């Protein structure tokens, strides 16, 4: 009996060793058709999440191609995710993605891209890929590059084989019983202005200023001209580092005015030029308000102009009632907003030269 038991035990161990020695087969490779060639894709099949939610791309997963993580844009950006607008021109092979104030143009099999008209170079060329099992052909684009252009946060976990895309502009705005001037859920960084032309700057900021004017009463042409003059077309240190387009300091009229959207604690410190009563320039070190977006900068600026007080009366009294940009600028200057004697003249010249008054319609 004991001998029989030993034989069975020995046989069981042999069978177990044989099972363990058999190699486990790897996941079946994807059969893809790229540029007319059929290839077996054996690298990781990537998942994608957008603002914490899984994107359904089981039959057309994101893949690593040409050294970049490529994603099927249509499922991630159009039908799911932010649901942005898109057009595709078959003749030119150009895909145009439009989201808020950003337009991205991508071209089939080309690394050249355009962001609001500014030429960029992608990490990999977009291309059509056919997943033969599902018989679906999708246009794949480099995730990291395009997310950066759109202002989305991109991260990748190799261990989880997951691309994480976060869009901060869709996070909820702090609720309040009192609506703030030009409040908006959009979130645009001044970083996009760094390589923009003057016309691109106007076309980007114009709609934001126009939207703000409808609620604040500050004319769009006035907002645009002030932003141009005070931020150097959005390229100043303060604009780039703090999204502050108007030189808004941390302490204005005692900060007793209503409607401010500044959080009260985000500060950027730098040297700034001032003018004395004789119009002579001098420099001081001052703290400036730091904003998460240019929309917040405009909203806070308009709230200041329309609600700031000098004693018991409004500092810029009559601003909303003024029907011309020159009148509004004169009220702003006389209220002590600027120390330069040519402030109104300089801004009116900008409005005329670049036809900023068109945004007041």
Image (cartoon, grey):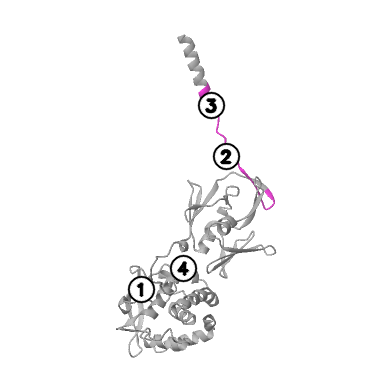
Residue sitting at x 40%, y 85%: 332
Q: Can you name the residue that lies furthest to the bottom here?
A: 278
Q: Quadrant of residue 288?
A: bottom left
Is-magenta flag for residue 39? Answer: no
Gap between marks 4 and 1 measured at Cα: 17 Å
Gap between marks 2 and 1 measured at Cα: 56 Å
Left or right: 270 in relation to 91? left
Dot 3 crowding, Cα within 10 Å, few <14, some 14–19, many 20+: few
Of the two numbered discs 3 and 4 on the same chain, state the one appearing first in sequence.
Answer: 3
Q: Secondary structure at mark 1?
A: strand
Is-magenta flag for residue 26? Answer: yes
Could you tell me if residue 95 is visible in this image?
no
Q: Secondary structure at mark 3?
A: helix
Gap between marks 3 and 4 measured at Cα: 59 Å
Residue where numbered disc 4 is placed: 189
Q: Position of residue 356 (x, y in %)?
A: 52, 82
Q: Which mark is residue 19?
A: 3
Of the two numbered discs 4 and 2 on the same chain, state the one appearing first in sequence.
Answer: 2
Gap between marks 4 and 2 measured at Cα: 42 Å
Residue sitting at x 50%, y 69%: 192
Of the two numbered discs 4 and 1 on the same chain, state the one appearing first in sequence.
Answer: 4
Gap between marks 2 and 3 measured at Cα: 19 Å
Residue where numbered disc 1 is placed: 288
């Amino acid at each position: 009996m004991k001998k029989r038991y030993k034989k069975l035990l020995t046989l069981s161990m042999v069978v177990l060793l044989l099972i363990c020695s058999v190699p486990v087969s790897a996941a079946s490779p994807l059969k893809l058709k790229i540029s007319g060639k059929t290839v077996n894709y054996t690298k990781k099949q990537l998942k994608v999440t957008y603002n914490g939610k899984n994107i359904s791309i089981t039959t057309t997963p994101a893949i690593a191609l040409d050294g970049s993580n490529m994603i099927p844009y249509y499922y991630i950006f159009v039908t799911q995710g932010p649901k942005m607008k898109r057009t595709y021109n078959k003749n030119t092979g150009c895909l145009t993605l439009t989201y808020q104030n950003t337009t991205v143009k991508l071209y089939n099999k080309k690394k050249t891209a355009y962001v609001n008209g500014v030429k960029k170079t992608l990490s990999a060329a977009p291309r059509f890929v056919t997943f033969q099992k599902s018989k679906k052909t999708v246009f794949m684009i480099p995730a990291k590059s395009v997310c950066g252009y759109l202002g989305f946060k991109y991260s990748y976990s190799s261990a989880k084989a997951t691309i994480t895309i976060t869009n901060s502009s869709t996070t909820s705005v702090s609720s309040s019983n009192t609506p703030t001037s030009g409040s908006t859920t959009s979130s645009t960084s001044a970083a996009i202005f760094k390589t923009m032309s003057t016309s691109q700057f106007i076309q980007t900021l114009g709609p934001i200023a126009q939207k703000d004017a409808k609620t604040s009463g500050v004319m769009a042409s006035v907002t645009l001209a002030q932003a141009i003059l005070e931020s150097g077309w959005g390229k100043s240190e303060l604009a780039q580092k703090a999204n502050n387009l108007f030189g808004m300091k941390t302490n204005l009229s005692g900060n007793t005015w209503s409607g401010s959207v500044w959080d009260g604690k985000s500060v950027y410190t730098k040297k700034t030029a001032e003018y004395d009563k004789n119009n002579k320039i001098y420099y001081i070190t001052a703290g400036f308000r730091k904003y998460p977006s240019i929309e917040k900068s405009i909203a806070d600026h308009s709230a200041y102009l329309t609600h700031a007080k000098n004693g018991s009366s409004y500092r810029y009294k009559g601003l909303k009632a003024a029907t011309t940009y020159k009148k509004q600028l004169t009220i702003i200057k006389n209220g002590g907003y600027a120390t330069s004697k040519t402030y109104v003249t300089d801004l009116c010249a900008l409005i005329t030269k670049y036809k900023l008054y068109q945004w007041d319609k």
